[in-house]
Amino acid sequence: MIKSTATEHALIERFLEVLRELPDVHAEMGVQEPALAAPYQIDAEIHLNVAGKPIVLLVEAKKTAYPRDVRQVLWQFKALGPEYPSNVQPILVAESLSPGAKELLKSERVGYYDSGGSLFLPAPGAYVFIDRPPPKALEKSVRSLFSGRRAQVLHALLIHHQDWFGVTEVAERAQVAPSTASDVLGELERFDWLESRGQGPSKERHLREPGELLDAWAKQLASSTAPVLRRYYVPGLKSEALLQRLGEVFDVHQVGYAVSYEAAAQCYAPFLSGISQVRTRLLPGAGADTALAELDARVVTEGANLAVIETKSAGELLFRQQLEDVWLASPVQVYLDLLRGEGRAKEMAEHLRRERIGF
């Protein structure tokens, strides 16, 4: 049986036009009896003729699709029978498909199309693969997940990735509103990165795929702008002595800070024989200005041994750890920062992830 809503019908029509633009392809919406007697309703059946070879596409349409949605679609396609006839190809069309959804469909050799123009058609004798950037709506949605207060929720989940937690608990750890925590958890469930147990107010989640979440965060950062650094030269101190002195002075003046990049990574998991610069996140204010003056930190354009990233909120200092009287950004934050560093920073990031983060 075939069914589709008005929105799905418009999406399928666009897909049909894309197929007709391919060379040596003739495509028509199926009007005759379906090729298979499906136990559920499909959204459309498209009949292709590719260079004289007949192919039938069984189409499932969705507005957006994440791995969780794809698993349901795959189950529906499998319900059609243990094997399709050689000329029948299942395909999912959507306004937007997450990268994980595309990978899952490809691994199962199920076709897909999204409104950004990406197309995967693995039919025998008519293999087509077009990979284009995701639609702007999906790109914006994913980008917002890894920024601001929503990123604080991700940070909390990665730091406590072995725990089970409720919405209120993760909101408290991330210092965000429960509604923000709930929204983020819902998004992560769609990516299929969480496990859940219980129902209602007692429902708990567990981050099943911390490595995939961290990879996705790193990938998102690769296309974002690096934070602005204010560069200083502190005379008379090499990096290790500067690190200790910075910790002493900042604590005296009650400055919120967290050392990151190479200096922090070297403390967590030594990798380099030496470092030339200390980089730290810093909450701006009168105390911070006084502390920098006491360090005799001089603004420079080159030759800096101290670099400061001014934070917008205390949330950017979450999960910092104190080692030898110095506050360090969390290993997760240091890893992400290093990926945007220079020189051997990326090598150092992978060493830190392997030795300290562990996923």
Image: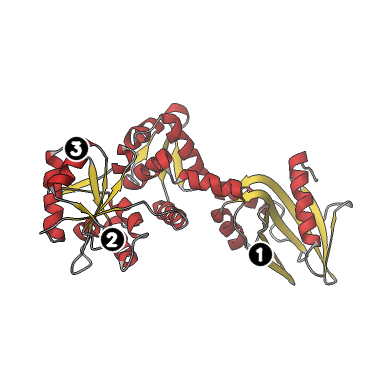
* Marking on residue 356: none
Disc 1 target residue = 130
The x, y position of residue 109, in whole percent, is 64, 63
Find out whether the residues at labels 2 and 1 contact each other: C-beta distance under 8 Å: no
Sooner in the amino-acid sequence: mark 1 or mark 3: 1
The correct choice, above or below, for 66 with respect to 132 in the image is above
Q: Which residue is mark 2?
A: 352
Give the image location of residue 41, x and y in percent.
76, 44
Secondary structure at badge 3 equals: helix
Mark 1 vs mark 3, CA separation in Å: 55 Å
Q: Which mark is residue 287?
A: 3
Q: Earlier in the sequence, mark 2 or mark 1?
A: 1
- Gap in Å between the C-alphas at discs 3 and 2? 32 Å
Residue 117 in which image quadrant: bottom right
Q: Amino acid at mark 1?
A: Ile
Residue 142 position within the rendered picture, expressed as x and y whole percent measured from the top left: 51, 47
305 above or below 9? below
Q: Secondary structure at mark 2?
A: helix
What is the three-letter code of the residue carrying label 3?
A: Gly
